[in-house]
Image (spheres, rainbow, N blue to C red):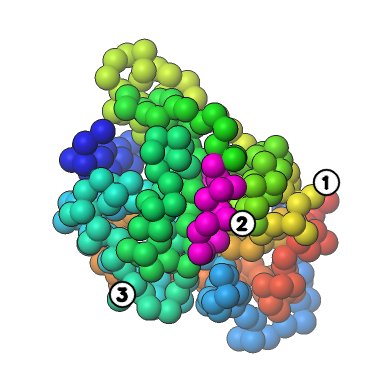
């Protein structure tokens, strides 16, 4: 794939997200989870704390703006700057989109040079794990981390997206061994991340055995990358395949349940279909140390950093209200506290 075509693909993705309402699948499963309301919470709302620690940094709430984009085009640069400025202002974490474009095209580096805009928050770099089977290694990983001055590196796992893509890279064989080798060499933690189909217990075991201690579960129910790639299909068969698999995978609650036996061995980010502060609270109760959200920030990121800050504030306030109504004074009081779930 050429450097220009990668940037164009990013533009295609944004256009699809803006024009096809059905890309947002609204099948996350969070609505099936009920919380145990407290009519007598015994708390002063003003003293409820949403602060938490992530990658050795104190955040104002357990929110990570998840990977969206990056590339050589001006609008992609502006989007990432808006996100970085807002994340710094609101004291939340930020992950960038795939940096493969930057590796292949130096012009794209500007969209990932964000540390000056966000000097004090966790930044997460990002490359596709499958690229380890296509020539990428420690040099590319270090470059992604160094350009962003990142605190960690996402290795994203997207087998469904790759198999639907017209130009997809589909050799996922023996990746665990290469992930293990990379983890031993890289100076920052690697986070294994799905992109919208969830990670199963078998995936987590493979990752733990490879030395990985952070996982972003990224379940289905929010943005469907299979449907997005259907928009880019080169023939009807390819398009029909993307639509057929648009709801494939584990929901985020299902993935969180699968991850619970491994809580003493690893740390988990909940993402995929989280669309309000109540979903965030449910995710923390089920074992997510932090909650990743991407698509709801898209329009705000295209607008301004102020618009992104407003969106973050809404999520944080909803999270705090739900926390208050559960009688939980801190985020620690929510984490893995299944007494806060209403049993069926």
Compared across the picture, whether 246 is left or right of 144 comes to: right
Task: Give x and y (percent) for residue 162.
Answer: 42, 30
Q: Please report the residue visible at 79 percent of the width from the left and 54 percent of the height from the top.
A: 342
**Observer-nearest of 308 and 171:** 171
Query: Mark 2 or mark 3, which is nearer the start of the sequence?
Result: 3
Q: Which residues are magenta?
A: 178-195
Provide the residue designation for mark 3: 117
Q: Is residue 182 magenta?
A: yes
For the question of whether residue 65 can be seen, the reply is no
| Residue for point 56% across, 54% down | 183
Residue depth check, mark 3 versus mark 2: number of the one nearer the observer: 2
| Residue placed under numbered mark 2 in the picture | 214
46 left or right of 112 in image = right
> Percent x, y for residue 122?
47, 70
Alpha carbons under labels 3 and 1: distance apart: 47 Å
Can residue 339 be seen in this snapshot? Answer: yes
- Dot 2 or dot 1, earlier in sequence: 2
Q: CA distance from mark 3 to mark 2?
A: 25 Å
Q: Which residue is mark 1?
A: 344
Q: Secondary structure at mark 2?
A: strand
The reply to whether the C-beta atoms of the residues labelled 3 and 1 are less than 8 Å apart is no
SS at mark 3 in the image:
loop
Q: Is residue 241 above or below residue 297?
A: above
């Amino acid at each position: 794939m050429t450097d220009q075509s990668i940037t164009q693909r990013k533009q295609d993705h944004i256009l699809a997200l803006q024009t096809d309402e059905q890309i947002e699948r609204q099948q996350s499963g969070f609505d099936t989870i009920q919380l145990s309301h407290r009519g007598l919470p015994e708390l002063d709302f003003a003293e409820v704390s949403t602060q938490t620690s992530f990658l050795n940094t104190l955040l104002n709430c357990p929110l990570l703006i998840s990977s969206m984009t990056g590339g050589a085009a001006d609008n992609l640069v502006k989007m990432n700057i808006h996100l970085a400025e807002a994340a710094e202002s609101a004291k939340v974490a930020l992950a960038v989109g795939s940096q493969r474009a930057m590796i292949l095209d130096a012009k794209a580096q500007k969209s990932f040079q964000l540390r000056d805009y966000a000097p004090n928050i966790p930044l997460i770099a990002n490359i596709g794990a499958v690229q380890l089977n296509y020539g990428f290694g420690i040099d590319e990983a270090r470059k992604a981390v160094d350009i962003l001055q990142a605190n960690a590196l996402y290795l994203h796992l997207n087998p469904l997206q790759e198999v639907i893509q017209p130009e997809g890279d589909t050799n996922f064989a023996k990746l665990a061994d290469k992930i293990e080798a990379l983890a031993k060499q890289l100076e920052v933690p690697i986070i294994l991340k799905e992109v919208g189909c969830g990670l199963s217990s078998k995936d987590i075991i493979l990752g733990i055995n490879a030395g990985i201690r952070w996982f972003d579960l990224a379940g289905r129910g929010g943005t469907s990358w299979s449907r997005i790639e259907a928009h880019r299909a080169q023939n009807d068969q390819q398009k029909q395949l993307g639509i057929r698999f648009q709801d494939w995978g584990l929901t985020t609650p299902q993935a969180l349940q699968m991850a619970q036996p491994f809580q003493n061995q690893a740390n988990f980010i909940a993402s995929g279909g989280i669309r309000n502060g109540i979903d965030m609270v449910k995710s923390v109760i089920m074992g997510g140390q932090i909650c990743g959200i991407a698509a709801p920030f898209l329009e705000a990121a295209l607008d301004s950093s102020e618009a992104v800050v407003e969106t973050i504030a809404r999520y944080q306030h909803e999270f705090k209200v739900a926390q208050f109504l559960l009688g939980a004074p801190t985020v620690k009081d929510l984490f893995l506290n299944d007494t806060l779930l209403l049993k069926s």
